[in-house]
Amino acid sequence: MNTEYEIRVLEIDKEKLIKKLEELGAEFKGDNEQKRYVYDIIPKEDGKWIRLRTNGRKTTLTYKNVVKTTIDGTKELEVEVSDFEKTNELLENMGIKSRGYQENKRTQYILNGVEIDIDSWPMIPTYVEIEGKNEEEVMNTLEILELPKDKVTTLDVDSVYKKYGIDLKDIKVLKFN
């Protein structure tokens, strides 16, 4: 299983960040709409779930395990699958029922090998996700981008929503209107 080295910086100014990324020569990877189904594992366990996600070009099935809420606290096992809806159908027929369908918009850049994803989700402010090969890469990128340290979190998406008083487990379909 791989360790994710990732932070989120909440409530960012998207246009200002894009300008900074372009000034630094970051490689623009694209804008896309992501669609995902989220499933609880069986038996249900806090901090563990399955995510089926597509951006229209690539579809992945990922097992997530949050062992601690730190920059390196999430373990994941991911495989690429060929068909988003068929994979959902397969999981559902195996008794693994989706607890929710979610959509978000992502603008992606690469800077010095570090993935920078500007994510917009329904009902909450835009944030940026910084993911690298190790903690040092992630924290160096945070410094280079001059993002506010007081807005940094290692919370997962469900927990970010809870921070804004929204329980995603109560929302079966999360989409932009």
Image: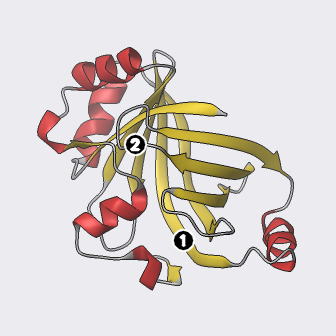
User: Which residue is depicted at the point 86% across and 54% down?
Assistant: 82
User: Label 1, label 2: how many angstroms apart (C-alpha)?
Assistant: 24 Å
From the viewer's perspective, is the residue at label 1 or at label 2 nearer? 2
Disc 1 is placed on an element classified as strand
Q: Note whether 94 is above or below 57 in the view shown.
A: below
- For this rendering, which residue is in front, 176 or 24? 176
Determine if residue 177 is in view.
no
Identify the amino acid type marked 1. Gln
* Of callouts 1 and 2, the N-terminal one: 2
Q: Quadrant of the N terminus?
A: top right
Would residue 128 be found to the left or right of residue 29 on screen?
left
- Residue 22 is situated, as x and y percent measured from the top left of the image, at 36, 27
Task: Describe the colour scheme in one phrase.
Answer: secondary structure
User: Of helix, strand and loop, which one carries label 2?
Assistant: loop
Q: Position of residue 50 (x, y in %)?
A: 65, 59
Q: Is residue 35 left or right of residue 165?
A: right
Q: Is residue 23 above or below residue 92?
A: above
Q: Which residue occupies the foreground of this view, 73 or 142?
A: 73
Determine whether label 1 and label 2 are within 8 Å by CB: no
Q: In this view of the protein, can residue 72 be seen by the observer?
A: yes
The quadrant where residue 90 appears: bottom right
Residue type at mark 2 is Lys
Q: Position of residue 37 (x, y in %)?
A: 64, 69
How many numbered marks, from 0 up? Answer: 2
Q: Please give the residue where the numbered disc 1 appears in the rendered image.
A: 102
**Could you tell whether 133 is left or right of 94 in the image?**
left
Quick one: label 1, few (<14), some, or many (20+) residues within 10 Å? Answer: some
Q: Which residue is mark 2?
A: 68
Q: Is residue 131 left or right of residue 2?
A: left
Location of the C terminus by quadrant is: bottom left
Q: Residue at x 53, y 82 (%)?
A: 173
